[in-house]
Image (cartoon, rainbow, N blue to C red):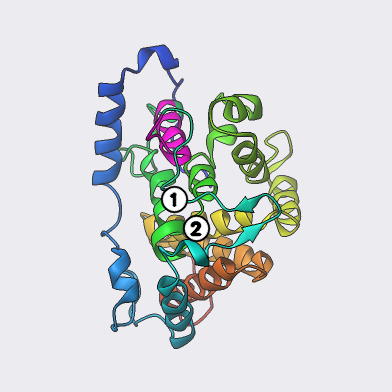
Amino acid sequence: MSQHDTTTPASDADHPIADFADTVDDALITIVAPIRLHDLKSASRPRHPLLSQPASDEAHRMIAQESLSLGSPASCPESDSGPVNRMSESVGVPGMTLWQIAASLACRLHRGQVRKDTFTPYVAHPFRVAMIVSNIFVEKDQTVAAAALLHDAIEDTPADRDEIAEKVSPEVAGIVCELTKDMRLPEDQREQKFLDDLSKASWQARLIKMADVYDNLCDAPTEAMRFKAVRKAREVLQIAGSDHPSLAIAGAVLQDLIDSVDPDGDERCA
């Protein structure tokens, strides 16, 4: 979900490692109140700063159950191609993970863009989305984290699928494409087509989109924008499904957030 004023991104050659580090520091400073994984494992029920009540028993149960399985190689789900990629695995340069490569690319691509508050670097949003996927939705697949970091890259920057496939991975590029709206269409048609396509997308794309609307709801600077974000969140929640454990967790937590912001379900716009 785009929320920025766009300026022309600079080329990769203009961004040395030191500049990237500064950009990451700026982004992380703006991230919502830190959420520690051990909070999800503790006996206390998880709470988000925007939630007036603790998370529901169902959300807490699913988070606790999923958290107990983290860190155990034997508990990693298997696929036809073997165990899923975890964030500790290296890709390319020794010690460099897929999500680290994606983080570097996201900072370069979104350089110069800001959120609607006019001063927060836009890259804070994809970083928060990736952290929501990992820390709140408790999904540790590094491919999902990398795609979350780049989920707006094709839609909002000059990057295309080929660039992401080459610099990160074809799988990440495919997920990002599923999260990209067709900007050639009129807005009403574009939004409806995106939702239709999302309902048939991979579980990874649907999970990232739930994290996207979660963050946009948390980050809405005005009441009117907050209730617009509620409507978007409800639309995504309705089609996201629960055919993967992380989707079930995400759906319960997102529903809690929606209910706390709009307890009467009237989606007022002030």
Secondary structure mostly taken by the magenta-highlighted segment of the chain: helix
Percent x, y for residue 267? 52, 71
Residue 80, image x, y percentages: 71, 54
Q: Nearer the viewer, mark 1 or mark 2?
A: 1
Q: Earlier in the sequence, mark 1 or mark 2?
A: 1
- Which residue in the rendered view is the most extreme toward the bottom? 57
The residue carrying pointer 2 sits among few (fewer than 14), some (14 to 19) or many (20 or more) residues within 10 Å by Cα, namely: many
Question: In this rendering, is residue 53 above or below 220?
Answer: below
Residues under numbered marks 1 and 2 in contact, where contact means CB atoms less than 8 Å apart: yes
Name the residue: 70% across, 50% down: 194
Q: Residue at the front extreme?
A: 74
- Pick the front one: 242 or 213: 242
Residue type marked 1: Ala
The reply to whether the magenta stretch includes residue 82 is no
Q: Which residues are magenta?
A: 94-108
Of the numbered discs in the image, which one, if any, rests on residue 9?
A: none
> Is the C terminus in the top left, top right, bottom left or bottom right quadrant?
bottom left
Which residue position is annotated with label 1? 130
Query: Number of labelled discs?
Result: 2
Label 1: state its secondary structure. Answer: helix
Q: Which residue is mark 2?
A: 211
Q: Which residue shows up at 51% across the image and 39% down it? A: 150
Looking at the image, is 269 positioned above or below residue 15? Answer: below
